[in-house]
Image (spheres, rainbow, N blue to C red):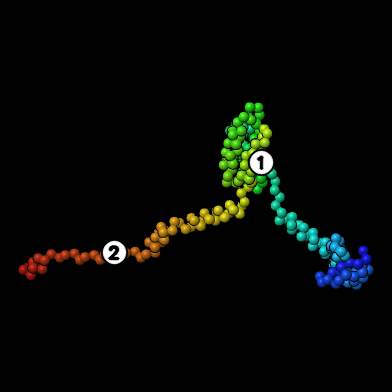
Amino acid sequence: MPEVRLIGDDGQQVGVVKTDEALRYAQERDLDLVEVAPEARPPVVRVLDYSKYKYEQEQKAKAARRHQKQITIREIKLRPKIATNDYETKRGHVRRFLGSQDKVKITIMFRGRETTHPERGEQLLMRLAEDVADLGTIEQRPNLDGRNMTMVLGPVKQREAGDDEGEGDQKRESGGGKDSRRNRAAAEAPAPEAPAAEPEPQPAAEEEIRRSA
């Protein structure tokens, strides 16, 4: 490439220069000449410390990966006429997966004449969704595809669950509005004073008896 658009080590654009001049510019500053936009015309190059630049790019990539949430989809297979014990076991697996913030794909497998009653599979899936509603929500409703019926459950977001708990605590603290204010007012009000005792009446004839004596 005979010419390049040069960006200096301070981030300011130097302009379009000869490639040899750009190399000389970088060598004078003991830095590297890095091509940052090869598709441009002319290509864009920048003067920088390549080792530091590479390290910063790796750190940015690591930070981006940390913020990316990896979604795992688990699969549970059921039969329309599943036994109670087997159903409870499968339900436990679904709850565990949802609790780990994984999605769960539940598949009902029909065999033979079972395909003539797809509503039984749908009822089973909806029953399972209700049993785990505190941990998961339906992302894909029951869908029949050939001999299989599938449904996808997604985990309830943890922050939403925390918000619900906070709202519940706030409601409990409020304690019913008027009743709580009435109770507090009653507790803060001074206790009523007891009425003064009336003096006991003295017998009228007692003084006259003493005089006659």
Name the residue: 83% across, 61% down. 54
x and y percentages locating residue 213 in the rendered image: 6, 68
Q: Residues within 10 Å of mark 1 (few under 14, many from 20)?
A: some
The numbered disc on residue 194 is: 2
- Residue 76's place in the image compared with 211, above or below, is above
The residue sitting at the front extreme is 41
Mark 2–mark 1 Cα distance, whole angstroms, equals 74 Å
Q: Which residue is mark 1?
A: 105
Secondary structure under the numbered disc 2 in the rendered image = loop
Amino acid type assigned to the residue bearing label 1 in the image: Lys
Name the residue: 70% across, 52% down. 69
In terms of image quadrants, where is residue 20? Answer: bottom right
**Residue 187 falls left or right of residue 81:** left
Name the residue: 63% across, 45% down. 139
Which badge, 2 or 1, comes first in the chain's sequence? 1
Quadrant in which the N terminus is drawn: bottom right
- Residue 21's place in the image compared with 100, above or below, is below
